[in-house]
Image (cartoon, helix red, strand yellow):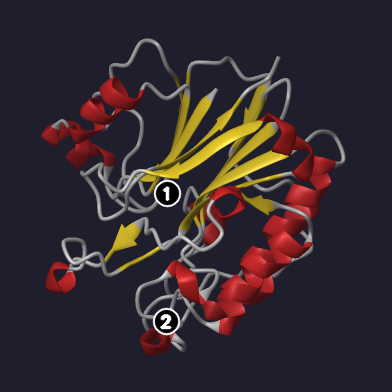
Amino acid sequence: MRLFSWNVNGLRAGLKKGTFQDFLNCEQPDIVCLQETKTKPGQVEVDFPEYLEIWNSAERPGYSGTAIFTKFQPLRSSTEFPATIVDNYAWDSDKHGNPLAEGRIQTVEFQPFYLVNVYVPNSKRDLARLKLREEVWDPALLAYLKELEKTKPVVICGDFNVAHTAVDLARPKDNEKNAGFTEEERQGIKNLINAGFVDTFRYFYPGVQKYSWWSHWAQARQRNIGWRIDYFLISPSLLPYLKNAEIHDYIMGSDHCPVSIELEFA
């Protein structure tokens, strides 16, 4: 089973250019989780009959959003945190909007595991959403994943908008207090790992510097001045089935590239 995650930075653009179709044709993912789709069903012509489409679009047009295309029929799916999680946190709207209305999370249940697709809020250049990340989103997400784990293992993937350690970005010293590499954001990833979730890429490649996002400025991608902010994390009980984890930095079509894992069940 090949699972991919990709922040497409606008699915309509990828379909218009053909880069998304090229990706599907070349990689043949069994499941692909998308972030920053920036569209709603019906606003874009998607014709991939081998895939079931599951959407969670933002209320605000042309913004955020997630989607899952899967060749496997899920047992069930949801597009929000459960009320038991929501009620424990102060999800107040900020100047950027209500994070619960931005299409940022999806959960699909398969027989062997839950799959959670996330587009974690960006803390913003002025760190206006850092408090949201630290006090609301990150702890709520961890609580939700641990609740799911009581039933069966969890695979979580998506754009987490944070580089975990210094090896996960090209210029760590220059970015220590910048969005995406603050101590508060990095603690969110640390908390997931401390809770037992396994960073699949680091499991196979502990010290390899490979990136999944590059700024549009100063030819950052051509110069490979990037960040690893897209992840697949799994419950430790899934490790016996984990065969591979990759960052596909040769695939174009977005400022992010896809990341993937391969799971093999008997």
Q: In the image, what residue occupies the spot 73% across and 58% down? A: 142
Q: Amino acid at mark 2?
A: Pro
Q: Amino acid at mark 1?
A: Glu
- Mark 1 or mark 2, which has the lower sequence index? 1
As measured in the structure, the alpha-carbon distance from the residue carrying label 1 to the one carrying label 2 is 35 Å
Q: Quick check: can you spot residue 101?
A: yes
- Between 59 and 76, the one lying in front of the other is 76
x and y, in percent, of residue 265 in the image:
68, 19
x and y, in percent, of residue 215 in the image:
25, 67
Check the picture and name the quadrant holding the C terminus. top right
Q: Quadrant of residue 39?
A: top left
- Residue farthest top in this picture: 49
Query: Vertically, is 85 above or below 237?
Result: below
Q: Which residue is mark 2?
A: 172
* Residue neighbourhood size for the residue with mark 1, other residues' Cα within 10 Å, grouped as few (<14), some (14–19), many (≥20): some
Query: Vertically, is 244 above or below 217?
Result: above
Judged from the image, the secondary structure of the residue bearing numbered disc 1 is: loop
Q: Which residue is mark 1?
A: 59
Query: Vertically, is 264 above or below 88?
Result: above
Q: Quadrant of residue 37?
A: top left
Query: Vertically, is 113 above or below 235?
Result: above
